[in-house]
Amino acid sequence: METLDTDEIRTILHDNGVGVLALDGGPGPYAIPVAFGYEQDNQRLVLQLSEADGSRKSRSLTHNPNVCLTVYEETEPGAKWRSVVVEGKLVEIPYAEAETAFATLAKRTAEVPTPMGWRSVTDAATVTPYELEIEHLSGQQFARG
C-alpha cells in the first residue's frame, strides 16, 4: 500500500464522478452510491440528493451532517487500484453555486446522468444540491507485484 499525495487525490476526484457516501443512519451506518462533481481549482465537491420529507437520508443529515465519501478506481484491472476517502460536512447550497462542479461531472463522466436529468419536473423539488465541505482527504494505492 502506498499513500497518495494531495495532487494525486485531487486528480482522482476530478477524473471520477461516482462514489459511495456514508451517512450516520442512526442505529447503523447508511451508505449510498452518488454522483458528484469536483472543481479542482477551488476544491469544491458537490452532489445532489433526492430527499423526501422523513426519508432516511433526510433524517440522517438532520441528525448528523458529517459524512464520508469513498471513491476508487482500478487503473490496471486486477493489478492496481487507487482509493480516496473524503471526510467533511454536507451543506445545502443553491444550484447556482453547484453549477460549475456539475458541469465538470458532465464532462468527465458521460455515463452519469446530468443533474436533474434523471428526475421528472415534478420530482425536481425533492432534489437538493449539497457541497461536501472537505475537512480531511486521504488516499492509497495498491499494486500487485
Image: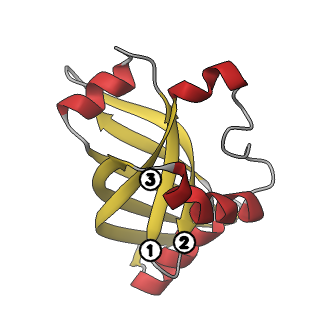
What element does badge 2 sit on? strand
CA–CA distance between discs 1 and 3? 16 Å
**What distance separates the C-alpha of mark 2 from that of mark 3?**
17 Å
Mark 1 secondary-structure assignment: loop
Q: Which mark is residue 43?
A: 1
Q: Residue at x 19, y 30 (%)?
A: 63
User: In which quadrant of the rendered view does residue 108 lie?
Assistant: bottom right
Note whether residue 78 is visible: no
Quadrant location of the N terminus? bottom left
Identify which amino acid the numbered label 2 is placed on: Glu
Residue indicated by mark 2: 39
- Observer-side mark, 1 or 3, equals 1
What amino acid is labelled 3 in the image?
Answer: Thr
Q: Is residue 118 left or right of residue 84?
A: right
Rendered residue at 66%/19% (across/down): 122
The image shows residue 82 at horizontal and vertical percentages of 53, 67
- Measured along the vertical axis of the image, is residue 127 above or below residue 36? above
- The residue singled out by tag 3 in the image is 70
Left or right: where does residue 88 sit relative to residue 6? left
Is mark 2 in CB contact (under 8 Å) with mark 1?
yes
Instruction: List x then y, in percent, for residue 10.
Output: 49, 76
